[in-house]
Image: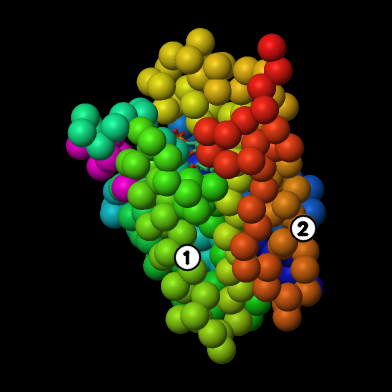
Amino acid sequence: MSTRTAVVTGASSGIGEATARHLASQGCHVYIGARRIDRLRKLADEIGGTALELDVTSEDSVRAFTDAIPRVDVLVNNAGGAKGLAPVAEADLDDWRWMWETNVLGTLRVTKALLPKLIDSGDGLIVTITSVAAFHAYDNGSGYTSAKHAQAVLHRTLRGELLGKPVRLTEIAPGAVETEFSLVRFDGDQERADQVYAGIDPLVAQDIAEIVGFVASRPPHVNLDQIIVAPRDQAAPGRFARRG
Ligand SMILES: NC(=O)c1ccc[n+]([C@@H]2O[C@H](COP(=O)([O-])OP(=O)(O)OC[C@H]3O[C@@H](n4cnc5c(N)ncnc54)[C@H](OP(=O)(O)O)[C@@H]3O)[C@@H](O)[C@H]2O)c1
């Protein structure tokens, strides 16, 4: 059997980087995309993958990225994130645009472009990294929770639309994972980012990567629809058992 090909968006850091490493360790050739190409090149050298610059908010960039990939067995829609925490009354429209463009339209652009190749593979798999924010609303988080709900509904809709086609769909919805996520959300404020994980044992990127690896190694008739995973210390967004 030929080597399976995986595509991971947002692979320059966090969950995407760990997932690319893990899928490569399972024998996949991994195409990795993100804007920070220097980081991707280093990772590609390490895992024997292919680094390609990708900005999921740009039609041209997504076209160049997806055109460069000849075959796709596994697509991991991971690129995304949050910007800011603000009540609706003070919503920053630019932050909302960033979150919707990256999480929602980014997932749509990449998935739409790669669907024919996923179908042609004869056993395609689409994994989308949504969030517990795709299941809950929380105060000051509406830009992110609404984007993650929309991204999740796009993904869940495909499950029905692709029935009868050889493509499986899995949504993975993590709670708190310690990555660069909070650093990005708080515009590089490391102290504020650290507070998110203070006094808890958060998930780490490798935890999610191993779940993607498990999903990708099930036989073709098994579709894991949704996986919600949180640290033991987290019952819901914003509901933590913190020590100290
Ligand atoms: N960490 C958490 O607690 C958590 C919980 C639930 C869900 N998630 C979701 O998990 C996914 C990965 O996040 P993470 O925690 O690993 O955060 P991260 O460390 O900040 O990684 C985010 C990745 O997305 C990429 N990205 C951002 N904008 C992009 C764009 N326009 N085009 C292409 N790539 C872009 C970044 O690469 P470049 O900046 O180099 O482009 C980076 O590789 C996100 O969808 C996030 O919403 C995270």
Q: Residues within 10 Å of mark 1 (few under 14, many from 20)?
A: many
In the displayed structure image, the side of residue 54 where residue 11 appears, left or right: right
- Residue annotated with mark 2: 214
Quadrant assignment for the N terminus: bottom right
The kind of residue on which mark 2 rests is Phe
Which is more N-terminal, label 1 or label 2? 1
Residue at left offset 60%, top offset 82%: 166
Q: Which residue is mark 1?
A: 155
The quarter of the picture where the C terminus appears is: top right
Q: CA distance from mark 2 to mark 1?
A: 19 Å
* Total tally of numbered discs in the picture: 2
Q: Position of residue 36 (x, y in %)?
A: 46, 32
The residue lying at 51 percent from left, 19 percent from top is 193
Q: Are marks 2 and 1 in contact (CB under 8 Å)?
A: no
**Residue 128 in the image, given as x and y percentages of width and height:** 54, 57
Residue 84 sits above or below residue 190 on the image: below
**Secondary structure beneath label 2:** helix
Kindly report the secondary structure that dominates the magenta region of the rendered protein.
helix
Task: Give the quarter of the image for residue 109.
Answer: bottom left
Crowd class of label 2 (few under 14; some 14 to 19; many from 20; radius 10 Å): few
The residue range painted magenta reads 93-100
Q: Three-letter amino acid code at disc 1?
A: His
Residue nearest the viewer, comparing 218 with 93: 93
Look at 34% across and 42% down and name the residue there. Answer: 142
Residue lying at the far bottom of the rendered structure = 164
Q: Quadrant of residue 124?
A: bottom right
Q: Position of residue 125 (x, y in %)?
A: 61, 68
Residue 112 lies, with reference to residue 121, above or below; the image says above
